Image: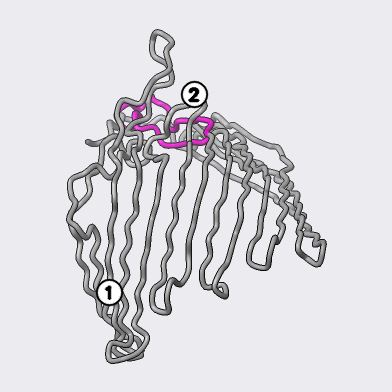
Amino acid sequence: MYPNYPAAFSYRNGNSYQNLQLYLNQRFGFFDDRFYVTGGLMDYSTLTKSWNALTNSGFSVLDDSKLMWTSSALFKVRKNISLYYSHSTNSSPVIANNNPLWRDGVQDEAGFKTEFFQQKLSFNAAWFQISQTKVTVPNPARQTDPTAPEQLVSDLSNNGLEFEVMGSLTENLSAVANYSHLKMRDSLGRHIRGVADDNASLLLNYRIADGPCKGLSFTGGVIYNGRRAGDAPITFTPLGEIGKTSFFLEPQYVTTFSTNYRWNKWVSTRLNIDNLFNNEGYIAVAGGRVSGTGITTSTGINVRLTTTVSF
């Protein structure tokens, strides 16, 4: 599908930014540096302009400043275990449908960080809550209707939990794994297109450090994305009911495998295999908010063999 271009253009976006940011940050340590308190301020001044560069008219100006702040506390329960909490506000100038405006946000986060086995393995967890106003994404209807707004503007919120394990399981085997459960919604409580509530990933690496196969390594990984909204619903129906998501994408797994062998300090060979089990044809991206109104299916197995020579 190709965009429906008009016979003659009537608008060409022009914009300019002049920004000034001033920072102040301070950290205090107490109880032999087992307890830290950090605070910061940022003053953000902007002169943001938008206009029709084709006719040099229709000027819109945002000439304003905002004061943002951040605070956090960290307590070391033990040498290898820390608890923390942080709160921050943020603002940035954006242009939505040729109108300069502020995008504002608030974020809270609390969690713990741990290290074990002489800092070889870490386990971390966090709770977060985020809100953001004036989030803009390209409007898919614009491709076939030149009179439709260029961007969709909405207020979003997100909260959830994150868990992460990273480090060496044995002398040769290392791992990175994470899982997140989140609830990202718009101001009407609806799912955001292409964003899953449950996401996870696992990456394992095995490296041979001695013997006749020294320099050989294997890496395998999998990424999981849960059920995702497939479209961006209308705000309200003609009867005043809140629009609903028309379809959801099934959960998907993305797999990868690679092996690398260094022959000497100059030459190495690497084999990469994406979509290891040749799981093709499923809907990978519903894209309309970002890359068009269509949907994208995954390709089959992809094999790449490369040899690198360094001088």
Q: Judging from the image, what secondary structure is the residue with disc 2 in?
A: loop
Count the marks: 2
How far apart are the two marked residues, 2 and 1, measured between alpha carbons?
A: 47 Å
Quarter of the image for the N terminus: give it. top left
For label 1, the residue is 259
Q: For the residue carrying disc 1, how many other residues have a C-alpha within 10 Å: few (<14), some (14-19), or many (20+)?
A: some
Q: How is the image coloured?
A: one colour
Determine whether, in the image, residue 218 is placed left or right of residue 40: left
Residue found farthest to the top: 239
Q: Position of residue 171 (x, y in %)?
A: 42, 79
Give me the residue at 33% from left, 85% from top.
215
Residue 158, x across and y down, in percent: 52, 38
Q: Say above or below: 183 vs 40.
A: above
Three-letter code, disc 1: Thr
158, 112: nearer the viewer: 112
The vertical placement of 5 against 277, above or below, is above
Instruction: Give the magenta range.
Output: 135-156
In front: label 2 or label 1: 1
195 sits to left or right of 161: left
Q: Please tell me which of labels 2 and 1 falls first in the chain.
A: 2
Q: Is residue 309 left or right of residue 125?
A: left
Determine whether the residue tagged by mark 1 lies in a helix, strand or loop: strand
Residue 63: percent from left, percent from top: 69, 37
Give the quarter of the image for residue 282.
top left
The percent coordinates of residue 249 (x first, y second) are: 29, 37
Question: Type of residue at label 2?
Answer: Leu
In the rendered image, the vertical position of residue 111 relative to residue 305, given as above or below? above
Q: What residue is rendered at 70% in x and 61% in y?
A: 76
